[in-house]
Structure formats: C-alpha cells, structure tokens
Image (spheres, grey):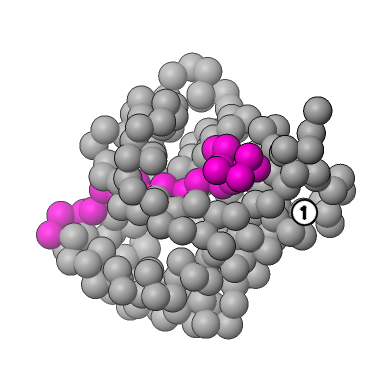
Amino acid sequence: MSRKLPKLEHTGRPWRIHEFTSDFRVEDVWAFHTPGAGPDDFPVMREALRVHGGLSRNSALASMIFAVRWKLGALFGWDRAETGLAGRVASVRERLSDDLRQAGAGQPAGDTPFSTVYELPDESADELANNTMHTVLHLGWVRGDSGDYELRMAALVKPNGLFGRLYMAGIAPFRYLLIYPALTRQWERAWRERAHLGAEPLMPAGERE
C-alpha cells in the first residue's frame, strides 16, 4: 500500500524538477506499491496511469468529490481560462532547459486536467493552474527497500495569495481522508492492470539477472 513520506525523500533526490521549481513548496510526498517493478518500468507505469488512472476511472466517492469541486469552480469562477496557464500564470515549461523542452512537454496528461511538462525514463512532471493555485505533480521511479522499484509522487504547490492558502488548508482533510486513499487504490490497480497495455509480466527485481 502507499505511504506518506517525509519531504526530504523528494527534495534530497537529484530530480530535474528542482532546476525550475524553487518558488513552489512541496506539499505532499507519497510512495505507491508497484510489486515486480524494475528500473526500466517507469514508462510502463506512466502509460498505465494514462489508460487506467484518469478521472473516468475514479471511484464513485472520488468522482462525487471532484464533481462538487468542479461545480464550485464553475460557480465562483475558479477554473476560467484566464485564471490558468498562459492566463494568470505562465507555464513552468517556459523555464525548461532545451533537453527537457523536447521531452514530451505540452501533451495532455491522459484523462486529467493536467498538462505534461516533461517526461524522462525515470521521472515526469505535469502541471495545472487555476484561481486557487499553480501546482506541479512530479512522479519519480525509485528503488524501494524490497528491491523492487516503486512510484513516488510529490505535489508542488504555489497558492494564489491568501485565498489560495486558505483553500489549501480547507481541502487538506479531504486530501488525506478521501482523495489519497482513492488515488492509492486507483494507481496501484493501474499497475496491476498494465497487462492490458501489452506489457509482459514482470519478475521481482531480485530475481532478474
């Protein structure tokens, strides 16, 4: 099962994301269980999330929570185009070095409201902005204590002033009690269902040559 990690587990690793997000704060860091995963399987996991990890695959409870959030956003204008990327804020893609700029930037991040910033063999970043915050979702591929590799997620956030900070504080209980448990079930199921993508069954890392 997933587990919450100290922020140092993200900030202490040499991820490329650190090159251009110094003005974002690390909000949450989580590890997701991906049994049998090896060092080269991050693209498989990423594709599994695109196919099986989007909004249309949410549980009924998670879908209800997001539906309420979208309704509130429509009512109060939180998600208008002018409050998002290239509106209220510039995309972090504008900060990328040349090599990252060519690594999948600007593509939709599957069935989600995020856009891809970059995608490398062992890490990726997606972003979303609205009137409450600008957030970057970082995914990394790390060898766990069992020897298998596991998915790491870090949520980097820049709240929009006092309103954004109050919004983040207000949704914190929902994130920890409802959203992250639902996300855990969905993302770990996406890994188990990767066979539907044509991936071969994977042996535990300790059994590989």
In the rendered image, the vertical position of residue 160 relative to residue 9, given as above or below: below
User: In which quadrant of the rendered view does residue 59 lie?
Assistant: bottom right
**Residue 161 or residue 22, whichever sits in front:** 22
- State whether residue 181 appears in this view: yes
The residue type indicated by label 1 comes to Arg
Magenta range is 142-162
Q: Residue at x 46, y 66 (%)?
A: 180
Above or below residue 132? Residue 12 is: above
Q: Position of residue 182 (x, y in %)?
A: 53, 71
Indicate the position of residue 206 as horizontal and vertical percent values.
Answer: 72, 38
Assign a secondary structure to mark 1.
Answer: helix
Left or right of residue 39, residue 198 in this image: right
Residue 208 occupies which quadrant of the picture? top right
Q: Which residue is rendered at x = 57% and y = 37% of the image?
A: 143
Q: Is residue 137 left or right of residue 209?
A: left
Q: Would you identify the image quadrant in which residue 133 lies? A: bottom left
- The residue that label 1 is drawn on is 194
Instruction: Give the quarter of the figure containing the C terminus.
Output: top right
**In this rendering, is residue 110 above or below 208?**
below
- On the image, the x and y values in percent for residue 91 come to 38, 38
Outermost residue toward the top?
98
Residue 73: say if magenta: no
Judged from this view, the residue extending furthest toward the left is 162
Can residue 161 be found in the magenta stretch? yes
The crowding category of the residue bearing disc 1, from other C-alpha atoms within 10 Å (few below 14, some 14 to 19, many at least 20), is many
The number of numbered discs placed on residues in the rendered structure image is 1
- x and y percentages locating residue 89 in the rendered image: 30, 44
Quarter that holds the N terminus: bottom right
Looking at the image, can residue 54 be seen? no
Left or right: 168, with 156 as reference point: left
Q: Main secondary structure of the magenta part?
A: strand
